[in-house]
Amino acid sequence: MSDESPLISSLRAAVAAAPGDVPLRLHLAHLLLEAGHGEAAVTEAAVALTHAPGDPQARELMMRAMGGPAVPVAPATPAVPATPAAPPEQPQSQGGFDWRAAEQEVGDVLPPRFTASGHQGGPEGFERPLTSDGGGDADGAPAFDIEAPGGLRLSDVGGMQEVKERLEAAFLAPMRNPELRKLFGKSLRGGLLLYGPPGCGKTFIARAVAGELGASFMSVSLSDVLDMYIGQSEKNVHEVFRTARQKAPCVVFLDELDALGAKRSRSHHSGLRNAVNQLLVELDGVEGDNEGVFVLAATNVPWDVDIALRRPGRLDRTLLVLPPDEPARESILRYHLKDRPIESVDLGKLVKVTEGFSGADLAHLCDSASESALMDSARTGTVRMINTKDLLSAARQLRPSTEAWFSSARNVALFANDGGMYDDLLAHLKKKRKL
């Protein structure tokens, strides 16, 4: 506001730097109100209430800013009538203040704290969303987000040619050729387990596979399935596959499979064991035809996944997703630097010194280099661009996060390679001379 005092302007800057400081924000709202900026005061008080719901000072200040008189924080409890009375159609005003008008006034600033739901047998006062069949809402719509077929393709994945070729040969080619599929009796279904170090693009590859198949995409994690009520976790797993069958062709992506499909022999939580059992039933298609449902799963620790999930007909194919190769690293670096102020950046040199870095590591490297240039600009008062020196310096200070994973995986590849599941990992370790 052009007519703001220097004190209010300073307070605005302080609040922007510390948005969670409720007393500071309320002080700003008080000064705005005294200066005649009622709407701005309402906004600040509403934001304060999002950080401290029920704060008496924030409520009182909001009432004053909206033209209502201040009311006690805890009004006296009215006497109980001799006979129960029907609730009024509109909420009664307290102290002459119209609460409904106030709610409408700040509706776009202060989101509702509660949503309408039906009570379904939990502890008193604890409410759960209405469901139609273990996971839908009251209207029968699925509770799981389904992404429509997108434009992402494997060609959008930089480098990683070996991974693409294996995906094409083992998974995609049979799905793209219905005549050959029919001739050889190949079902339009399949399961693939992606494993490897964290941050190397397993989720991105899964989305690209869905794009190649022209299929919808559904991402499922442990939080989507596990429930505190007996039997509800199994119903949630069933709902995932029921929804996927309705939306076929559909790729169901089971993220962090080691959590969702952990070894039952090690699980002390009966709900989780039952969820794994239900997942096995759904993968077999016992309760429904899985034609057109493609199950992809990702994990950093495949050795912690229940062995029954990798039985033929379920997640029977595995694919090792390694840290990005040189073309992939160049593509990732270009992506993270494209919107930053850079000059004279030698990507070739940077690619060579980042071998073993995951995609997440490369993103962090770009952030660190950007921070270095920003701090120099702040100290000198002259803006300078990010250069090769900043990026190389950041690369020297970072250690690839994949090293810890390979240290653990090495023992598994050497001593627990049952059935040759980790032959790809063993070959990679030999190639990099890490054995």
Image: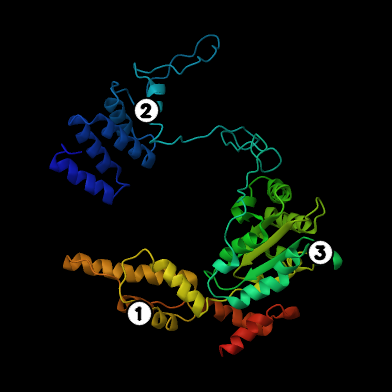
Q: CA distance from mark 1 to mark 2?
A: 53 Å
Residue 194, picture quadrant? bottom right
Q: Which disc number belongs to residue 215?
A: none
Point out residue 167 in the picture as x, y percentages from the top left corner: 67, 71
Foreground residue among 126 and 34: 34
Foreground residue among 176 and 196: 176
Q: Secondary structure at mark 2?
A: helix
- Type of amino acid at the residue the image marks with label 2: Glu
Q: Is residue 215 above or below residue 409?
A: above
**Residue located 49% across and 73% down the image:** 358
Point out residue 30 in the picture as x, y percentages from the top left corner: 22, 34
Residue 120, picture quadrant? top right
Q: Which disc number belongs to residue 105?
A: 2
First-in-chain label (3 vs 2) = 2
Q: Secondary structure at mark 1?
A: helix
Foreground residue among 241 and 257: 241
Residue 333, picture quadrant? bottom left
Point out residue 267 in the picture as x, y percentages from the top left corner: 68, 61
**Residue located 49% across and 80% down the image:** 326
Q: Report which residue position mark 3 lands on.
A: 179
Q: Report which residue position mark 1 lands on.
A: 392
**Residue located 26% across and 38% down the image:** 26
Please indicate whether residue 94 sits to the left or right of residue 125 in the image. Answer: left
Point out residue 415 in the picture as x, y percentages from the top left corner: 68, 84
Q: In the rendered structure, are the residues bearing label 3 and label 2 in contact, judged by CB atoms less than 8 Å apart?
A: no
